[in-house]
Image (cartoon, helix red, strand yellow):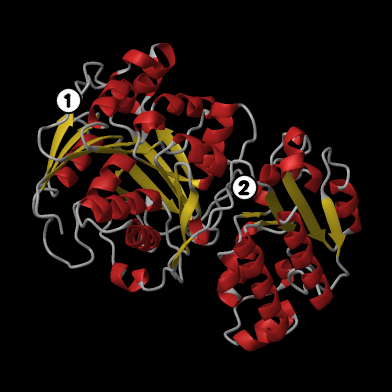
Amino acid sequence: MSSSPLHLTVIGDVFVDVTIQTPNLQPPPGSDTLIPPVKTAPGGSGINFLTHFTANYIDNTASLPNVTVEFHTAFNTEDDCGEILLQHLSTLPQVTTHCFDNSSNAATGHCVVLTSSVSSERTFFTHRGAMNHLNPAPLSPPTTASHFHLTGLMNMTLVLDTLRSSPSTSPILLTLKSHHSNGRTTSLVPQFSPNPSDYSLISHLLPYTTYLILSENEATSIASSITKTSEDYVKFFTKNVEYTIVTKGSLGACIIKRNSGIILTSSSPLVHSVVDSTGAGDAFAAGFLKSIKVEEKDMLESLRIGCAYGGAACMKLGATVALERVNELMKTVDVSLESSSFKDSGKEVFCVFDFDQTLTCVETSEFHFSSDNKVASVNQVFGSQHRMNMIVEMLKELKGKGCRISILSNNSSFVIRKCLRKLCPEAESCFERILGFEDVQCNNLGMPCSKSVSILDIIGRNSSNSSSRSVIFIDDNKTNIRDVQKIEGGVETKLIARGGMDEADIQEIIDWAGQQLNT
């Protein structure tokens, strides 16, 4: 624990979340669904972050010594939602809140959250209200050791407008720049944007950001928005940000370091039942940054703690509820040092696998995972324990060689992750991307695009870089194989007999990867 005082300055968004638990995030029009009681609670990434940053879930002490926090935000202190936020902030004694002048008398921002434990996803209906008017004047860093944290940027309309119209004089940029000096550090959590073009505005802030914390979807969107290409986000952030921490849901997280690429990867904690994933990213950021800045732990341990916080948040309904079992979850997170596959002049090698009847021996969409007999389930899905072990060893060897391994399937990525988590958790951490039908682009008929289109989300859409990359696509479906063979720039393919890869197939892919990396 740090003995010197830390002053944390936070600019962040606040909302009141109205959370509805429903098995179906898109109920049919005119239907009537029975649900548990609707829950109203404080939310928004700013207040979510502060709630978990100022709590001590690991040693259970009441407060963090030598830590003071200034929080700058915007809400209407006189409406019902504002009262909910004020009451919650009053329970955070180390936090001094500065509420931006709301001369427009706009309502406090509020958000209807549909959450489903069936799909582990959520859908938002947001009214930003007073958050649309937040644009604080430049803040000077305090004389004490300090850290500046900006979270919920994509919900700050005026801040984005000033970055768009006059970036060099934008108050938020000037604040970030002044804090990113003299040994001080900064962090940025942009959050999801309903307007993808706004992501490019983040480019102005990256030179002054020590820690960029975001989801994999946000990382991909920001990289493509700024470069106007499909450049891989690992490459982009390796060139442009000091440290980028990317959360990948059930696939854990990774840390990308400037000029080094991926230096750490982690598995996700073993969460047996996801209740509500709202605010999990904010909890991750709180755990990670508190470990770095307050506990003064190293990156490896901080990544483990961040993952445990994020996992614990998924086990509770609501984003500002006290977390439990953090210590227990920390023990289930594996963190490993990486020799990054990023090389300025090296070759990228992609191995893209179909899932059903390729890695597995069955159509997993037709398989029920309710059985507690793991041996029987492994035999049914993977053919045998021996075959599953061969698959796992292949994936580990490919990853160890520096290959970038993904799944591209017409099945649901939720089903695939569920299968891997239950039967083969070692394999799950080997995959950089798992794309199912719900993760890929759709055609004009609303159907998932062909694999020749979807695979470009994994390997990049710029055919001019084909000389510096090698790709192999493995599938049991002849139509998919012929489709992918049409890609300009060349993708090698391997057709697998239905029933899954055998030992000879596995060895052939390992040999192919070795040849590509040695040429």
Disc 2/disc 1 C-alpha distance (Å)? 52 Å
Quarter holding the N terminus? bottom left
> Residue 28 has which mark?
2
Judged by depth in the image, the label closer to the viewer, 2 or 1, is 1
Which residue occupies the foreground of this view, 259 or 292? 259
Whether the residues at callouts 2 and 1 have beta carbons within 8 Å, the answer is no
Q: Is residue 354 visible?
A: no
Which residue occupies the foreground of this view, 45 or 287? 287
Q: Is residue 55 visible?
A: yes
Q: Is residue 410 above or below residue 170?
A: below
Please give the name of the residue rendered at 59% of the width and 46% of the height, measured from the top-left corner: 343
Q: Is residue 386 above or below residue 423?
A: below
Please give the name of the residue rendered at 66% of the width and 64% of the height, measured from the top-left corner: 398
In the rendered image, residue 318, in percent from the top left (x then y), is placed at: 34, 53
Crowd rating for badge 2 (residues with CA inside 10 Å; few <14, some 14–19, many 20+): few
Q: Is residue 22 above or below residue 415?
A: above
Amino acid type, residue under disc 1 in the picture: Ser
Q: Is residue 174 left or right of residue 140?
A: right
In the rendered image, residue 68, in percent from the top left (x then y), is placed at: 11, 44
In the rendered image, residue 305, in percent from the top left (x then y), is placed at: 33, 61
Q: Is residue 342 left or right of residue 411?
A: left
Residue behind mark 1: 140
Please give the name of the residue rendered at 64% of the width and 88% of the height, measured from the top-left corner: 375
Crowd rating for badge 1 (residues with CA inside 10 Å; few <14, some 14–19, many 20+): few
Determine the image quadrant of residue 145: top left
Determine the image quadrant of residue 223: top right
Amino acid type, residue under disc 2 in the picture: Pro
Q: Is residue 289 left or right of residue 162?
A: left
Q: Is residue 2 left or right of residue 197?
A: left
In the rendered image, residue 280, in percent from the top left (x then y), is placed at: 39, 53
Indicate which disc, 2 or 1, sits on the residue closer to the N terminus. Answer: 2
